[in-house]
Structure formats: C-alpha cells, structure tokens
Image (cartoon, rainbow, N blue to C red):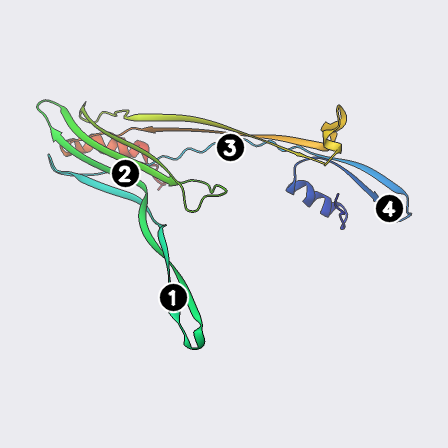
Amino acid sequence: MATLAGGASAIGQALAASPGVFLGFGSNRSGQARYGLLLNALQSNSATNILSTPSLMTLDNKQAEIVVGQDVPFVTGSYSTTLNQGGGGVVSSPFQTIERKKVGITLKVTPQINEGDSVRLKLDLTVSSIAPSISGAVDLITNTRQVKTVVITDNGAIVVLGGLIQDSYTDSVQKVPLLGSLPFIGRLFSSTSRHVAEAESDDLPASGDHRYAKRRERLYRRKIPHPAP
C-alpha cells in the first residue's frame, strides 16, 4: 500500500505510471474516512514501416558492396595486471578487450549482363540490429538475417529473396498481495496486460542496367518523395 500526497495531480501521476485497478484509502479535512476505486485502462496500437533502399552501381562482373550501419563495440575478453608496490602491497588493474563490428545493412552484389534483357545477380545481403537487453546477458545481443543466393532476373525486375513473419506475445499480471489472489473479487485488486508484437520483413532487391537510366529515374521518383516547389 502506498500513500499519495498532492491531491488529484499525484493520483493522476500514479495512474499513468501503473495501469490497472487500485483501491485507495484516505481522509478529508474533516477527518471522515473516504474510500475510492481508481480504474485506469490503456490501449495502444502502433505500426512501424521501415523501408531501406540502398543503391549500388558497378561494372559487369565486378563486385560492389555497401554498408549502412554503426560500429558497435563488443567485449571480446578481459584480463588484469598486478603491480607490486613497496611494503608488500599489490595493485590489480582490470582491462577489457573491445572489438567493433558493423551492425546494420550490408549488401554485396556481382552482376552479369546476359544476352537479351536478363541479368544474373550474385547477392549477399545481411541485416543486423541490436536486440533489447536480456537479464543475465553479459554483452550485447544482435539479431541477424542473411541471404546468399544467385538469381537470373529481367532488367529492372524486383526479386523476393526471403521474408520473415514473427509474432510474440507477452502477458503480465500485477496484483495486490493476498487480496489479488482471492476468488471472484481478486480481479478488483489486480490488472492483466498483454503485449503483442508482430514483425514482418522482406528482402526485395531490384536490378537495373545503366542504359535504362530514364526508366530507373521514374522508379526512384515514385519511391522517394520530393518536396513541393
């Protein structure tokens, strides 16, 4: 049980911090007891659409690479050194070894222009990101998707290399000790929330011959918004 001071403002802050159902006791200036039931329900729905369109230009049968991301430090080891001082004292100095790795989007492509209007593509696509921290983890955790393949496609066509749809559900229960476990009325002293996360990702590279520059320019104008004059 917690005591709130500050009137309606303090109660509003408490509700914003902890959604659910609460039963509070207090007294007014005349000393008479007051009972209150506070109910706070929160429902949110958010959607995120992140579109990454790195572009590469290279010669026939020559590999090109583009990296868009960050250099993230990872701990690779630790050691300590000891130094003897006068009078029998020993000083230990701990050190850590750090290695920086690229986290983001790495695309390697080697095109080969064939006869007619087709292009052979050797593709190596890696998409990585930093995962949320997990209790007990000693270092950063990364999510990684990688696709390596060789495809033949028409000039300017879009190819689906791979995709992933992932759903996760997290249920959490908050309740008042003892009162929240009572049958029938226990729900009045507890709150239940569910967090649903859905992630969908697709890798859709497109090839294009520089001889078709006007067609490629029209495609980019449709994908990239331009400010009004």
Local secondary structure at mark 1: strand
What residue is at 20 percent from the left and 30 percent from the top?
Answer: 207
What separation in Å lies between label 3 and label 2 (alpha carbons)?
26 Å
Give the amino acid type for the residue marked by disc 4 in the picture.
Asn
CB atoms at circles 3 and 4 under 8 Å apart? no
Q: Residue at x 25, y 37 (%)?
A: 107
Kind of residue at disc 1: Thr
The residue lying at 30 percent from left, 26 percent from top is 162
Could you classify mark 2 by the number of other residues whose Cα lies within 10 Å: few (under 14), some (14-19), or many (20 or more)?
Answer: few
Q: CA distance from mark 1 to mark 4?
A: 65 Å
Q: Position of residue 164 (x, y in %)?
A: 37, 26
Dot 3 or dot 4, earlier in sequence = 4
Q: Secondary structure at mark 3?
A: loop
Name the residue type under label 2. Answer: Pro
Quarter holding residue 59: top left
Residue at image mark 3: 46
Q: Secondary structure at mark 4?
A: loop
Q: Amino acid at mark 3?
A: Ser
Q: Give coordinates of residue 1: x percent, y percent.
A: 75, 43
Mark 4 Cα shell of 10 Å, populated few (<14), some (14-19), many (≥20): few
Whichever of labels 3 and 2 marks the residue nearer the N terminus, that label is 3
Residue 218's x, y, as percent?
25, 31
Residue 54, labelled with which disc?
2
Q: Which residue is mark 1?
A: 82
Q: Secondary structure at mark 2?
A: loop
When the figure is inspected, residue 176 is found, relative to residue 198, above or below; the finding is below
Q: Position of residue 118 (x, y in %)?
A: 14, 24
Camera-nearest label, 2 or 4 = 4
Q: Quadrant of residue 147?
A: top left
Q: Earlier in the sequence, mark 3 or mark 1?
A: 3
The mark closer to the camera, 2 or 1, is 1
- Classify 10 Å Cα crowding around label 1: few (below 14), some (14-19), many (20 and above): few
